[in-house]
Image: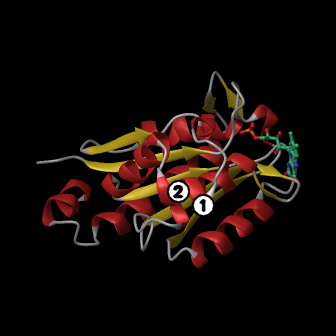
Amino acid sequence: MANMKILFLVGSLRRESLNGAAAASAAEMLPGGVEPTWFGRLDQLPHFDPDVEETNLPEAAQRLRGMVEEAAGVVICCPEYAHGASGVMKMTLEWLVGGTEMAAKPTMLVNVSTSNGGGLRAQRWLEETLTVMGVDVRPERVSVAAAARKVSGGRLVDEAALADLRGALDGFLTYVGSLGVGKDAVDLLY
Ligand SMILES: Cc1cc2nc3c(=O)[nH]c(=O)nc-3n(C[C@H](O)[C@H](O)[C@H](O)COP(=O)(O)O)c2cc1C
């Protein structure tokens, strides 16, 4: 029986990214039989260029689309820059707009910010963009505000934030598992 895959996309290139730490914590919460997959640093993707997309889709964009296709769900962990999502995340989505892989893909949003706003503006920005792409943006979401001291050693350590993340992830995985990806997927969760 194949594992159900959950793809993690981290919208920060920072070595000590708080969003990367939240992604690592979420991946460790996945139950047995649910496998985290990682695209890695989003700057592996070149600048989006529709001419290049049409004539010669770059290897990294092909790999990204393949990983989205294979995943039962996607978790996007993204910083808020100037009230929007990070540039690398925007460009990642641009490489996906022209494909079919993200259509109806269950996707959960996690935004971690050092500010009191908790990255909620980036979350709304992502929701709007993903919705126009036809993505199944799930209501299970996480926003962690004032996060500078809520991360240590590359993991979320704040109990309330961890509880939020666990609760959202549980709901998300229950939904993903119920989608009829196959009885196997549901069996994994119950
Ligand atoms: C260029 C820049 C713009 C930022 N703009 C915002 C913002 O609009 N709202 C916010 O909550 N935090 C903002 N921040 C702070 C980020 O939330 C903070 O740097 C966070 O740690 C970034 O996520 P990361 O740790 O995953 O890289 C900004 C940071 C940078 C570097």
98 relative position to 86: left or right: left
Q: Say above or below: 83 vs 42.
A: below
* Cβ atoms at labels 1 and 2 below 8 Å apart: yes
Which residue matches tag 2? 53
Disc assigned to residue 141 = none
Q: CA distance from mark 1 to mark 2?
A: 5 Å
Is label 1's Cβ within 8 Å of ligand 1? no
Q: Residues within 10 Å of mark 2 (few under 14, many from 20)?
A: some
Residue pictured at 36% horizontal, 50% vertical: 66
Which residue matches tag 1? 50
Q: From where the camera sits, is residue 162 visible?
A: yes
User: Looking at this view, is 152 or 3 the one in front?
Assistant: 3
* Percent coordinates x, y for residue 151 in the rendering: 69, 32
Quadrant of residue 148 within the rendered picture: top right
Q: Quadrant of ligand 1?
A: top right
7 relative position to 190: left or right: right
The three-letter amino acid code for the residue at tag 2 is Glu
* Percent coordinates x, y for residue 15 in the rendering: 69, 24
User: Looking at this view, is 161 or 137 the one in front?
Assistant: 137
Q: Residue furthest top?
A: 153
Residue pictured at 44% horizontal, 41% vertical: 59
